[in-house]
Amino acid sequence: MDEGKGRRFGDVIRETRLRKRPPLSLRRFAVQLDIAAAYLSKIESNLDRPPSAEVVEKMAEILELDRNELLRLANRIPTEFEEAFKRDQRAPDFMRVAMRSGYSPEELEELIQKKRAKKPK
């Protein structure tokens, strides 16, 4: 998603929706998202804050946008993170350790894969 600095969530959603071929109408998009068209119009006009993470994730899927980038732009946390934090009290500590480690996400994934490969079955 090439939204550049200063682009707002609603602008990106509206412009992407209208660029689809054929363009996706506001009403049809609202139906697909299971939200009111008036609410979607307010979001696209930046008159209302971005919707829940669940709706943002659905928007990303329908509009074929990068899910994580759209969530970041909406200032929302991915739903699976929220669920993990609710389900496991150690999840926030894990996130803090990972963030302080200095490793990139790819490096952390590689370390985890190596550790799993060494585990006896």
Image: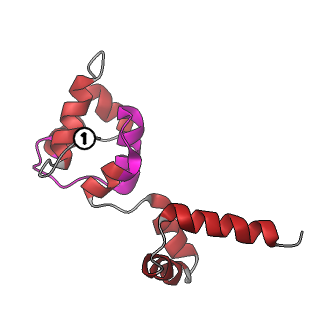
Q: How many marks?
A: 1
Q: Position of residue 9 (x, y in %)?
A: 20, 48
User: Which residue is denoted by mark 1 in the rendering?
Assistant: 2
Query: Can residue 25 be seen in the rendering of this structure?
Result: no
Q: Is residue 92 above or below residue 34?
A: below
Kind of residue at disc 1: Asp
Q: Residue at x 19, y 34 (%)?
A: 14
Query: Can residue 92 be seen in the rendering of this structure?
Result: yes
Closest to the observer: 52 or 62? 62
Q: Image quadrant of residue 45?
A: top left
Q: Image quadrant of residue 52?
A: bottom left
Residue neighbourhood size for the residue with mark 1, other residues' Cα within 10 Å, grouped as few (<14), some (14–19), many (≥20): few
Q: Position of residue 109 (x, y in %)?
A: 59, 63
Q: Does the stretch in magenta take in 76?
A: no
**In the image, 7: left or right of 76?**
left
- Residue at the far top: name it: 22
Q: Residue at x 40, y 42 (%)?
A: 58
Q: Is residue 59 above or below residue 115?
A: above
Q: Does the stretch in magenta take in 48?
A: yes
Closest to the observer: 117 or 43? 117
Q: Position of residue 29 (x, y in %)?
A: 31, 31
Q: Residue at x 48, y 76 (%)?
A: 95
Magenta residues (range): 43-68
Image quadrant occupied by the C terminus? bottom right
Q: Image quadrant of residue 65?
A: top left
Q: Secondary structure at mark 1?
A: loop
Q: Is residue 73 above or below residue 38?
A: below
**In the image, 114: left or right of 54?**
right
Image quadrant occupied by the N terminus? top left
